[in-house]
Amino acid sequence: MIALALRRFCRLTYLSLFRAKGTEGRLTRKRVKALVKLYLTLWPLQFIHLFFLLLDDVLFPGYRRVQIKAPVFIVGNPRGGTTHTLRLVAQDEERFHCAKTWESLLAPAICERKLIRALSRLDRRMGGKMNAKLTQAHDDLFHDLDQFHPIDLKAADEDEGFFGPIFATIQFIFMFPFLNEFDMALAFDQKTPPADKKTFIRFYRGIIQRALYVNGPEKQYLSKGPSNTFRIEALRQAFPDAKFIYVARNPLQTIPSQMSFLAYTWHAFCDIPEKYPFREFLFKNSGAFYRYPLEALEGNAPESSYAIVKYDDLVSDPKQTVADIYAGLGMTISPRFSAALDRAAEKAAGYKSQHAYSLGDTGFTREDVVAEYRDIFERFGFDTGENWTNDAKS
């Protein structure tokens, strides 16, 4: 674990300082300022996490005895509705535990969670001033991201942040635009060396055990992460009773939405002249998020171990769609969860996204998307959008 973390940290550092010329991460004044901030804040935080993760083995060795039973992994395209799916299913709190944003970003270790919770209790007794200041700092930091992905530290969200301490999270691609360095996220099953696969899966198993140790060893772990889309085979081998929910959304929505979001993040950390960096790469390679789950699941995994769902169905009839997912996976919906789904359906009916994007603005047309993803449109019966507008919200 330590060797992998140091190797990947050194590799990203080397590329940023000595191989950035001529790349989207070239060392302009803006880029240098961004790197200084990262090396003073984010990177020290990852090594602090790594220290506490190691300390867990000394102070809480019992977490290693936690049995991981039938974990559920929600996979699919970025901007494809996986977060919406997670937050629906996560309301089945009697059955599942899933990561909260604060846990994945600030407290992957048991020690950290217990420390933060102790400080939170102390702060409440003293009037909650610390919580108020942290809430304000959070709002200031993530305000601009709310248009893409509302971030609530206490809400269920993807567990990708847990992989920060070993520098294997796809989230670091925002800060380090060296796409070929992220095979552990974008081509795990196909390209990651066996030794690194073994280290990663061992690390992930420990993360899940820690989460269940603190929040309920009897529960099933629920995960959402687009990068797990490319870890399906490895996850099936590591957790033979694992279940998968693959969410598919119309490429006419996901492609421009994804390009818009990534362009925002890359421009925040890099000085890139193109409005949409890597547009050709993203347009072509986003297809793997659609095709690989079908390849890895259909015909290779027991039918009772996966569910394939269209995002539009989740939006139009969330309760029935979730009921279909549960039936396919051999699970039952409790009365409490059924009531929660009713409330979620009412809330979703009035929801409007604040993320505005334009397909035409990316330089691609409706015809381009339909031609490149024709097999996906046919497989899922997606609307090819003859009356489609280039402007949308997602």
Image: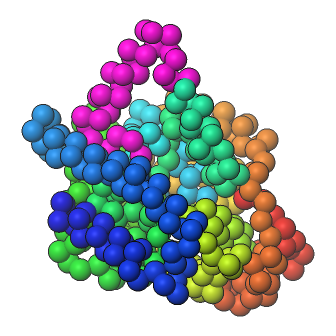
> Where is residue 258 drawn, in percent x and y?
64, 68
Q: Residue at x 30, y 66 (%)?
A: 9
Residue 115 lies in the magenta-colored region: yes
In percent of width and height, residue 146 lies at 67, 48
**Display colour scheme:** rainbow
Say which of 128 and 304 sits in front.
128
Question: Is 117 placed left or right of 352 in the picture?
Answer: left
- Image quadrant in which you'd find residue 350: top right
From the viewer's perspective, is residue 321 above or below residue 180? above
Residue at the extreme front of the image, as rendered = 29
- Of residues 381 and 96, which is closer to you in this image? 96
Instruction: Tell which residue pokes out farthest to the right in this image.
Output: 387
Residue 297: x and y in percent read 41, 73
Q: Main secondary structure of the magenta part?
A: helix
Residue 29 in view of the camera: yes
Write the residue at 72% across / 43% down.
348
Magenta-span inclusion, residue 176:
no
Task: Please name whichever residue, 340 or 288, is drawn nearer the observer in this view of the structure.
Answer: 288
Whether residue 223 sits left or right of residue 271 in the image: it is: left
The residue range painted magenta reads 105-132
159 vs 170: above or below: above
Residue shown at the point (66%, 89%) measured from the top left:
372
Q: Residue at x 76, y 51 (%)?
A: 354
The answer to whether residue 234 shows anywhere in this view is no
Quadrant including the N terminus: bottom left
Where the C terminus falls, by quadrant? bottom right
**Residue 349 sits above or below residue 367 on the image:** above
Q: Position of residue 104 (x, y in %)?
A: 40, 46
